[in-house]
Image: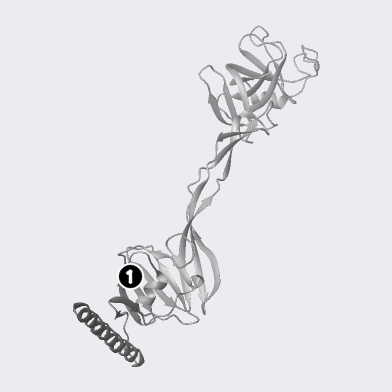
Amino acid sequence: MIEEKHEGIRFLKRRCWQALFVIMFAGAVLIQAVPGASASALYLLTDGISTVVTNGSGRIEAGRILVTGSGEDAGDIVLEADRKIVIRHGATVLYATSRENESVSELLRRESVNIGELEMVRVDVSGEDIFIEIASNFTYYEIAQESADYTTVYTPDYTLPRGETRVITPGVPGTREVTYEVVYADGEFVSRQAVAEGESNAVPEVVGVGTLVKEAREGDTIDQVIRNEDGSGYLILKSGDSLHFTHTMDVKCTAYTTGYDGVGTITYTGTTVHVGVVAVDKSVIPLGSKMFITTAAGDITYGMGSAEDTGVRGKVVDLFMNTYDECIQFGRRSSILYFLDD
């Protein structure tokens, strides 16, 4: 008797639930049928079970969802829970909060947002709030960090023989920020092109290019003198060439030529006189010494010279010149001899 009474009560409750379901479902249909009326989520209680029926579209194809600000490909991404959402669809702006494990499609369906055939969904997750825009035409900008190779910088190396190279500082690849303009029209991709590039943080490779030569070019002059503590150093010439010297000597220079004071055409060492022959005191400057000669004031450069003749005493050198007038014009001058490598 008691069981029959309980069964009757359960039957009555089931009939009540069914009646309530019919009433709420009819209400849902009525709301959707009336222009301007909508319900973002209708909860129909059937036998005590909650069923969600929405007024939105079905699942959106992943290719119609553009994700920006995350560095990942477009797709129906799962949103982080409890993020504030701003949805713009034409003139309509909606505000929502994401739920746990909720995708973009599920969010839009819950908010009763219908996507037209030519429309796409852009999801911008770069800010504190997630911004969702639905439109058929998009022009927006993406900023990407892209790899950047190092450049190579070449610099003169006065210690290296001309034509040779060596790495002074190894290059290190880096990254640069690239801004892309992305265009969609009528739901179709149109273009994506770089419109701006930031500075690369790659470390350039520095390569030294040798400028060291054995002899200076005719007429070349000194641009800079680099001295070492031991008295040696390098002459950086105007042409870009460099010469290595072992030591220097301050001397007095005079000039001589053939046909005067009994000077012939053959030197002490048996060579024929020519510009570049230097007469020395062989007890002071060894015969065969190679040197680069300039006046101490730097106003006259004799250039390359070789100790091939004699006839002077002490720290005095005599420079061969082609004419007597040149000798007279040169006179006697304080000069510097830069002794070069053999």
Amino acid type of the residue that numbered disc 1 sits on in the rendered structure: Ile
In the rendered view, does 241 fall on the left or right side of 174? right
Counting from the top left corner in percent of width and height, residue 7 is at: 24, 80
Q: Quick check: 209 above or below 140?
A: above
Counting from the top left corner in percent of width and height, residue 114 is at: 41, 81
Q: Quick check: 2 above or below 262?
A: below
Q: Which of 248 and 139 is in front in this view?
A: 139
In the rendered view, does 259 fall on the left or right side of 103? right
Counting from the top left corner in percent of width and height, residue 286 is at: 68, 10
Residue with the mark numbered 1: 85
Residue lying furthest top: 283
The quarter of the picture where residue 289 lies is top right
Counting from the top left corner in percent of width and height, residue 187 is at: 51, 77
The quarter of the picture where residue 216 lies is top right
Give the color scheme: rainbow, by chain, secondary structure or one colour.
one colour
Q: Nearer the viewer, residue 102 or 224?
A: 102
Q: Nearer the viewer, residue 196 or 162?
A: 196
Q: Which of 139 and 151 is in front in this view?
A: 139
Residue lying furthest front: 1
* Secondary structure beneath label 1: strand
Examine the rendering and report whether any part of residue 333 can be seen: no
Q: In which quarter of the image is the N terminus?
A: bottom left
Q: Quick check: 133 above or below 125?
A: below
Q: How crowded is mark 1: few (under 14 residues within 10 Å), some or many (20 or more)?
A: many
Q: Quadrant of the C terminus?
A: top right
The quarter of the picture where residue 327 lies is top right
Examine the rendering and report whether any part of residue 182 can be seen: yes
- State how many labels appear: 1
